[in-house]
Image (tube, helix red, strand yellow):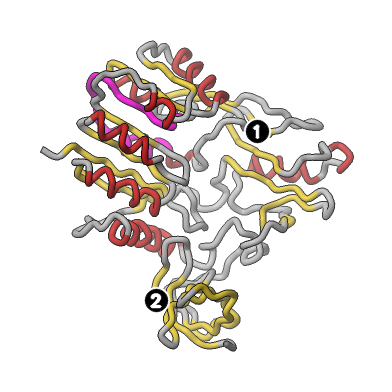
């Protein structure tokens, strides 16, 4: 099948543009809704065609010139071709699409995606891939494991970009021979890299969010966009209060600390031992003694969980979403309210369908653009137990 013309209708979950041709559905990468483009088929999967743009015949009014010289090759950003307003609209549409198609929800309320105050130079955390044979440092190329050598990443916070430049200026003889990737994170007092090598240390950092002080390093997960963390915490917790709250996948305690100020007892569960060490320290430094943080997978914790009523459950799982055993465990607890913080609308929708089937109703849905220039979006869904 040779090159052919299509019109892009909208952006789908996963960030691809949707088009149709010859009775087949075409997924077009790096598209804008309203584009008239000539495309080339990269691969076929049943009746689905996956295509790349060969020529833009009539650009969408929502299309802009991507400023990054690596765009299209680097796999990091896939929305730079869209105006920022179009990015936010596409993300609201992605959340809505997943809730309708996967969670089978009807009458979905309007979804507002809160914009990032900075849509460039916002990332406080990054993983750089390293190919010592090719002497390349950067990110994987789109749909590949080849490393795209990146000298300047336009979405990194300036401190992290400066660290990337210092890493790139380091002699290759100083790199550990088996080093394949490097994790970096920014704080108010510097940059932490993991693993340590040459002049670079896995130093401990500090960040303040809504008056709460958090310590962490590059070995513990922390959210990517500090400018929206206060709004995210406020929406996820609100004025919830009561007896016991569960904070699942709690990390270094982003939600644990404010929860401990509004509930009598907090139980945090997190599998990463470095993160739980920081979470306990952060609680101690805040003078909060009504929280207990447990190092365990959430599935394992539910298997051995002591009995007891729980008023509120907050969960912030990784992109893969929540394990079925965890959903079952939450439903067995019959909490009055649940707050689900998600970085993947598809797995969120899958899990919401189970929670709703288990007797909960959605009270609110809100999006937060923690990841400008990409199709990723953070979503907070608040649920209550139906009467």
Q: Nearer the viewer, residue 373 or 142?
A: 142
Residue 70 at least partly seen: yes
Q: Position of residue 175 (x, y in %)?
A: 82, 38
Write down the region rendered in magenta: 229-250
Q: Quadrant of the N terminus?
A: bottom right
Percent x, y for residue 336? Answer: 20, 31
Badge 1 element: strand
The residue lying toward the viewer, choosing from 122 and 270, is 270
Q: Is disc 1 surrounded by few (<14), some (14 to 19) or many (20+) residues within 10 Å?
A: many
How many angstroms separate mark 1 from mark 2 (CA)?
Answer: 42 Å
Q: Residue at x 39, y 29 (%)?
A: 255
Residue at image location 50% in from the left, 42% down from the top: 225
* Number of the label disc, if any, that sits on residue 191: 1
Q: Is residue 209 visible?
A: no
User: Which of the 4 image quarters holds residue 68?
Assistant: bottom right
Relative placement, left or right, of 32 versus 273 is left
Query: What residue occupies the far right of the structure in this picture?
Result: 173
Q: Earlier in the sequence, mark 1 or mark 2?
A: 2
Image coordinates for residue 204, horizontal then vertical, percent? 62, 24
The question of residue 98 being in magenta is answered with no
Q: Is residue 285 above or below residue 37?
A: above
Q: Which residue is mark 2?
A: 9
Residue 240 forms part of the magenta stretch: yes
Judging from the image, what secondary structure is the residue with disc 2 in? loop
Question: From the viewer's perspective, is residue 313 above or below residue 356?
Answer: above
Farthest residue toward the left?
A: 387
Instruction: Give the label, 1 or 2, closer to the camera.
Output: 2
- In x, y percent, where is residue 141? 66, 60
């Amino acid at each position: 099948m040779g090159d052919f013309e299509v019109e892009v209708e909208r952006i789908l979950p996963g960030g691809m543009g949707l088009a149709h041709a010859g009775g087949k559905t075409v997924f077009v990468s790096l598209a804008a809704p309203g584009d008239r483009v000539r495309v080339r088929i990269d691969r076929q999967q049943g009746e689905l065609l996956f295509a790349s743009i060969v020529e833009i015949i009539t650009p969408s009014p929502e299309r802009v010139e991507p400023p990054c010289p690596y765009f299209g090759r680097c796999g990091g950003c896939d929305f730079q071709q869209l105006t920022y307003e179009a990015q936010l609209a596409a993300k609201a549409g992605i959340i809505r699409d997943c809730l309708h198609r996967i969670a089978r929800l009807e009458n979905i309320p309007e979804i507002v995606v809160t914009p990032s105050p900075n849509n460039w130079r916002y990332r406080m955390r990054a993983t750089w891939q390293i190919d010592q044979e090719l002497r390349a440092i950067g990110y994987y190329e789109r749909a590949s494991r080849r490393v795209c050598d990146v000298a300047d990443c336009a979405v990194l916070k300036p401190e992290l970009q400066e660290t990337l430049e210092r890493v790139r200026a380091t002699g290759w003889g100083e790199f550990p021979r088996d080093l394949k990737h490097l994790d970096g994170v920014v704080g108010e007092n510097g940059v932490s890299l993991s693993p340590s090598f040459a002049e670079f240390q896995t130093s401990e950092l500090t960040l303040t969010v809504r008056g709460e002080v958090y310590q962490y390093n590059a070995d513990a997960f922390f959210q990517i966009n500090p400018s929206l963390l206060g709004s995210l915490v406020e929406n996820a917790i609100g004025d919830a209060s009561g007896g016991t709250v569960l904070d699942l996948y709690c990390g270094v305690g982003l939600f644990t600390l404010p929860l401990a100020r509004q509930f009598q007892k907090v139980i945090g569960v997190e599998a990463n031992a470095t993160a739980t060490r920081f979470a306990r320290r952060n609680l101690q430094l805040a003078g909060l003694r009504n929280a207990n943080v447990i190092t365990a997978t959430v599935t394992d914790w539910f298997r051995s969980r002591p009995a007891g009523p729980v008023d509120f459950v907050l969960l912030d799982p990784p992109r893969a979403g929540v394990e079925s055993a965890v959903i079952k465990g939450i439903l067995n607890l019959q909490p009055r309210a649940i707050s689900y913080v998600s970085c993947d609308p598809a797995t969120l929708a899958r899990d919401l369908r189970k929670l709703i089937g288990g007797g909960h109703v959605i009270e609110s849905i809100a999006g937060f653009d923690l990841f400008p220039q990409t199709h990723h979006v953070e979503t907070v869904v608040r649920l209550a137990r139906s009467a």
